[in-house]
């Protein structure tokens, strides 16, 4: 196994490993260390079934079942489908416009996701890329005064607000049901969190944020938008251009990501597993 670090320090390319094959503890420990060191790992040229995808994910911890149940793989609810493909009756098989805004997966839960593993089955010939931004680097680049100011604040995160905003945009999303909305009430998390495994500090905001605890609604919304723009800006980024067979794993505790659009005449079909995480502190 070889791990090649990308120039930006975010994203390690891991070759010489077959994620579908049994993996001993030593090999897993190497991957786990590379994950903590690089925040994003790219495993090219994989050929894995949903069962193997789930089994590899399970080495890291427990899996989440996404709230949008109509987009889960029928026999494997641990797998969320991101796709522009349609069923014979015209219904979408997956979320067609997933994540086209900077965010950290499931930040709207009391215990947001630790990590996500996205496996590309079919990709368009161009675009449809995914960008990642290091929230360690974004935090480290702040002045001491700004670090101190942000350390005292908590942001509000809400799934339904973002989902409904996206519904209005591309017109491909169904409205959330009352039951789905009830499962994801607003929560708040510290804007500066400490990574529970590395002990390093990171910024924790993004597209599910609607405001800041203790600020007026508009002021808080503008504050989190501006901070998310800064934290996802060019110097902190890695752009991943997909090939079919890539599995990309990212650490939601210290990296934000954003999907880009593509020509909808081409198919983009991916399976995602998502790991449960801890309450940010
Ligand atoms: C996501 O998981 O937020 C979507 C990523 C992508 O489709 O590139």
Image (tube, rainbow, N blue to C red):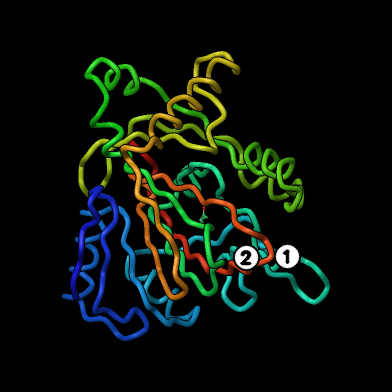
Vertical placement of residue 79 versus 161, above or below: below
Residue 120 visible in the displayed image: yes
Number of residues whose C-alpha sits closer than 10 Å to that of mark 2, classed few (under 14), some (14–19) or many (20 or more): many
Q: Are marks 2 and 1 in contact (CB under 8 Å)?
A: yes
The tag on residue 92 is 1
Taking the view exactly as shown, the residue that stands out farthest to the bottom is 21
**What is the quadrant of residue 137 in the picture?**
top left
Instruction: Decide if residue 275 is on the left or right side of residue 108.
Output: left
Q: Residue at x 62, y 39 (%)?
A: 162
- Quadrant (top left, top right, bottom left, bottom right) of the C terminus: top left
Residue 37 in picture, x, y percent from top left:
20, 54
Residue at (56% x, 47% y) in the render: 100
Q: For mark 2, give the secondary structure.
A: strand
Callout 1: few (<14), some (14-19), or many (20+) C-alpha neighbours within 10 Å? many
Residue at the farthest right position: 89
Where is residue 111 shown, x and y percent of the image?
44, 46
Task: Identify which residue, 129 or 126, lies in the foreground.
Answer: 126
In the image, farthest residue toward the front: 126
Mark number for residue 83?
2
Q: Is residue 219 above or below residue 276?
A: above
Depth order, front residue of 273/103: 103
Q: Is mark 2 within 8 Å of ligand 1?
A: no
The answer to whether residue 102 is left or right of residue 12 is right
Displayed quadrant of residue 200: top left
Q: How far apart are labels 2 and 1 at the CA level?
A: 8 Å
Look at the numbered disc 1 and give the secondary structure of its residue.
loop
């Amino acid at each position: 196994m070889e791990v090649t670090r990308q120039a930006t320090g975010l994203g390690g390319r891991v070759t010489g490993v077959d994620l579908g094959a049994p993996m001993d503890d030593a090999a897993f420990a190497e991957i786990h260390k590379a994950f903590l060191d690089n925040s994003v790992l790219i495993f090219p040229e994989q050929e894995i079934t949903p069962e193997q995808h789930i089994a590899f994910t399970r080495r890291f911890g427990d899996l989440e079942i996404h709230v949008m149940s109509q987009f889960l793989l029928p026999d494997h609810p641990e797998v969320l489908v991101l796709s522009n493909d349609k069923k014979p009756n015209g219904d979408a098989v997956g979320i067609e416009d997933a994540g086209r805004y900077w965010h950290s997966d499931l930040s709207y839960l009391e215990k947001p996701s630790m990590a996500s593993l996205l496996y590309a089955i079919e990709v368009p010939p161009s675009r449809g890329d995914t960008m990642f931004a290091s929230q360690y680097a974004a935090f480290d680049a702040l002045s001491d005064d700004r670090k101190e100011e942000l350390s005292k604040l908590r942001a509000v995160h809400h799934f339904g607000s973002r989902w409904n905003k996206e519904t209005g945009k591309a017109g491909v999303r169904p409205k959330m049901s009352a039951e789905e909305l009830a499962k994801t009430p607003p929560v708040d998390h510290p804007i500066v969190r400490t990574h529970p495994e590395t002990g390093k500090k990171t910024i924790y905001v993004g597209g599910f944020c609607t405001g800041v605890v203790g600020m007026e609604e508009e002021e808080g919304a503008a504050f989190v938008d501006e901070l998310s723009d800064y934290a996802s800006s060019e110097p902190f980024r890695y752009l991943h251009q997909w090939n079919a067979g890539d599995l990309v794993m990212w650490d939601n505790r210290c990296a934000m990501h954003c999907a880009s659009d593509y020509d909808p005449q081409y198919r983009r079909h991916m399976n995602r597993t998502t790991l449960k995480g801890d309450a940010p502190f």
